[in-house]
Amino acid sequence: MLLSKKKRYLQIALNSTMDEAFQIIQNLPVSDRILLEAGTPLIKEFGAEAIRNLYDWWGNKTHPHNVFPYIVADFKTMDRGETEVRIAKNAGASAAVCLGQAPIETINSFVESCEKNELDSMVDIMNIEYPIKILRKLKKQPDVVLLHRGVDEEKFNKDKPIPYIQINKVLSAYNVLISIAGGDTIREVQRAVFNGANIVVVWKEFYHSTDFTSQLAEGFLKEIK
């Protein structure tokens, strides 16, 4: 696994355009605790080239500081796990994402392929009430379990909670890292880390580049100790 269990990470999901992604990257502070995500909309619109661009742009900033440019390819894989891992690897990704809703055969293939290709495997448990029921069926656990309240869930169901309650349930059964997505405020970030999350995923505040992009990232990092 490329990530350290002793660190807490901020994963910034880039979902807008390549121009916006470039501007946001230019304004980010260099930190080995920042993971950049090629979000699903970005990949669907711009293809694997989106991953390559993020790797090159972030790498140009981080390499002089001896910081590894870590890129997450959020394919939300539902089939052809081995194929999509290969695409992620060839494009320069350090991790790829498979949906927990995928067939067990696909998740097993995905996790195995990630290990062979030296990528971190992330399984997104969005819209799964009991993650443990999926995880216990797997031949091998992924490196990261992503507990996720989806964008549409939050938009159309204000009462839908971020699944913090599942963090300890997963960690008590499996030796994995926990990623939390679905909250973007400092308060939500604090709560995720307090409950044991290793990675906090944010996107809203980083959809467009602003004069405060660097300050926002630094503020989040201060909360993620």
Image (spheres, helix red, strand yellow):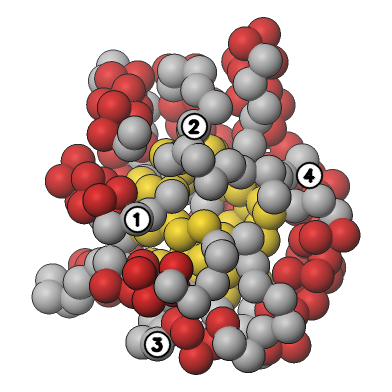
**Distance between the alpha carbons at the discs numbered 4 and 2:** 21 Å
Numbered disc 4: secondary structure: helix
Relative side of 160 to 82, left or right: left
The C terminus appears in which quarter of the rendering?
top left
Does residue 63 lie above or below 133 as drawn? above
Q: Residue sitting at 77 percent across and 40 percent down?
A: 92
The residue that appears at 79% across and 77% down in the rendered structure is 109
Q: CA distance from mark 3 to mark 4?
A: 33 Å
Q: Give me the residue at 53% from left, 46% from top.
A: 5
Which residue has dot 2 on it? 33
Residue marked by disc 1: 196
User: Do tag 4 and tag 2 residues touch (Cβ < 8 Å)?
Assistant: no
Residue highlighted by disc 3: 130
- Give residue 37's quadrant in the image: top right
- Residue type beneath disc 2: Arg
| Mark 1 or mark 4: whose residue is earlier in sequence | 4
Amino acid type for the residue under numbered disc 4: Ala
Residue type at tag 3:
Tyr
